[in-house]
Amino acid sequence: MYKSWNPDSNDKLHTSYTKLQCINQDVNKGDDTRLSVHISLSPSCEKTCQVKIQTVSDEPLSIKDEVDSEPATKKQKKHVSFAGVPEDEDKTQMDIKDIVQKISSAVPPIQSVVVNDISREDLIPAAAVEGESDTINENNGVYLKDPMGKVLLNYSQKRKGSHGVNDEAKYQKFILTLADGSDPSVARYHNKVQSLAKWFIEAGDDVDLSDETNGSWKVMYLFEQHKDKEDSSNKLSLAGYITLLHVSSPFRKPKPGTVVRVCQALILPPYHKAGHGTQMLHSVHDYAFRNRKYNSYDKEIPSDMIWEINVEDPAPAFVRLRDAVEYQRFIPLVDSAKYGPEALAAKGGDVPDCTYLNDEVTDKWYFDPVLDEHLLPVAEYLKITKRQCQKIHDIHKLSEIEIWKDRLDCTLVNDIDGSKKAQYIDEVETKYRLMVKKSLKQLRIEELSAACGKEEQKALLGKWFDETLSHYRRVLKANDMLGKRR
């Protein structure tokens, strides 16, 4: 994408560059039949976007029928298609203008098109012109001067590959903001940047922040902060965003109020696997939790009216992130059951009675379904769905089993022989497996009903349990909960 995302090497291309491969490449002949498309964004991901197209030929590629004068072999080499062309169809070059038009639906407004190092203003989509410069300044770029929305949080993150550099250059500074979709300037900005979601979110679609038919919109933005050494001014580049739809739910049980739905969550590739998604999702929960730190911007939608945070069609990676974050927020309740709720009470809200969590894994009722009288207050306190609350209880029980097994190895090794210990562990793990399978059976009853016979149903439940157990272990590993709590 933009060069500043890889400051250490201007020659090394970022992995998010798109390369379109010719489907009929003759590998044996060694033909280079690749069409390279580079999309350069300004740091703000708003004002300018440049598309560079390089064909295998050193000569500029015509838009229409100029290739007809070339030999057939050369036309064959330059054949490109987004979807591929069946062998029995005419293998004609896809129109360059069509390529730019398709790209324009998934990037901010295009201000410059370069084909084989030659500027082609005639290829710029008409809707892209807004009066700004038609090229990207590769040295300075176009940054935001002020953050979009109200600042929630400032934090620093260690820069990837920062070994051997001075202390100041080791860290990147970030600003987390919350913007109101009813603000026309926010709506205009988001209309330009949200098209990037089509590259990274399956079935990602645009949203109209000004449309309040189904509820009101807010957007949580993450910006990287750059310091200009010459004039000490701030420069901000987009790193990601989360769209939040606030839906009024007057008939919600047990209490009516507002439900916040996470609709889109996007972290741009250079910032992946650095903890930004975790930080943003925690901030969404903090926003809904009536954290005193955020009272200044909770005037329009009081935080005590937000009863639940849910997610619209989450991808598998986001499911792992969500479960990890919500389990992190559940652990203080576990500690409050052991040491008292006084510390949590200071944060506000009614701390639920979680003394039931003090039961031992060897208690015969430990793996019974959690009663609604326990489940619902915890779900309300954490602002999560009942199903999510059940899931984090299951994860917690797995954590307790692993801790119990370690203690068994350390303290009871001299009191019981190996076969007896193995029997104890097998009994506990069997109860856990049956508990999770019962929950899966209720959750996926339609899929089980479609299975042919009890044996197939049993095989499906076994497969789902293995996948669920693997997922729960990844959540525990990501949070390092086992190590912290031992």
Image (spheres, rainbow, N blue to C red):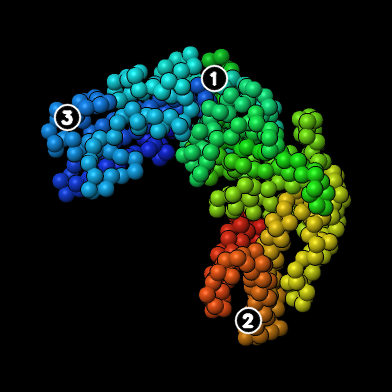
Using residue 435 as the reference point, say whether residue 189 is left or right of it: left
- Counting residues from the N terminus, which is met first, the one under dot 2 or under dot 1? 1
Q: Which mark is residue 422?
A: 2
Q: Which mark is residue 169?
A: none
Front-most of residues 430 and 463:
463
Toward which corner of the image does residue 300 lie, by quadrant?
A: top right
Query: Residue 449: x, y in percent?
Result: 59, 70
- Counting residues from the N terminus, which is met first, the one under dot 3 or under dot 2? 3
Quarter that holds the N terminus = top left
Identify the residue under disc 3: 68
Q: CA distance from mark 2 to mark 1?
A: 63 Å
Secondary structure of residue under mark 2: helix
Q: What residue appears at the point 62 percent right and 86 percent down from the top-left corner?
A: 419
Q: What residue appears at the point 80 percent right and 62 percent down from the top-left corner?
A: 372
Q: Are marks 2 and 1 in contact (CB under 8 Å)?
A: no
Where is 384 relative to 355, above or below? above
- The answer to whether residue 314 shows anywhere in this view is yes
Secondary structure of residue under mark 1: loop
Q: What residue appears at the point 12 percent right and 33 percent down from the top-left corner?
A: 71
Looking at the rendered structure, the kind of residue marked 1 is Asp
Identify the residue under disc 1: 228
Where is 84 relative to 480, above or below? above
Secondary structure of residue under mark 3: helix
Looking at the rendered structure, the kind of residue marked 2 is Ala
In this view, the residue farthest toward the left is 71
Quarter that holds the C terminus = bottom right
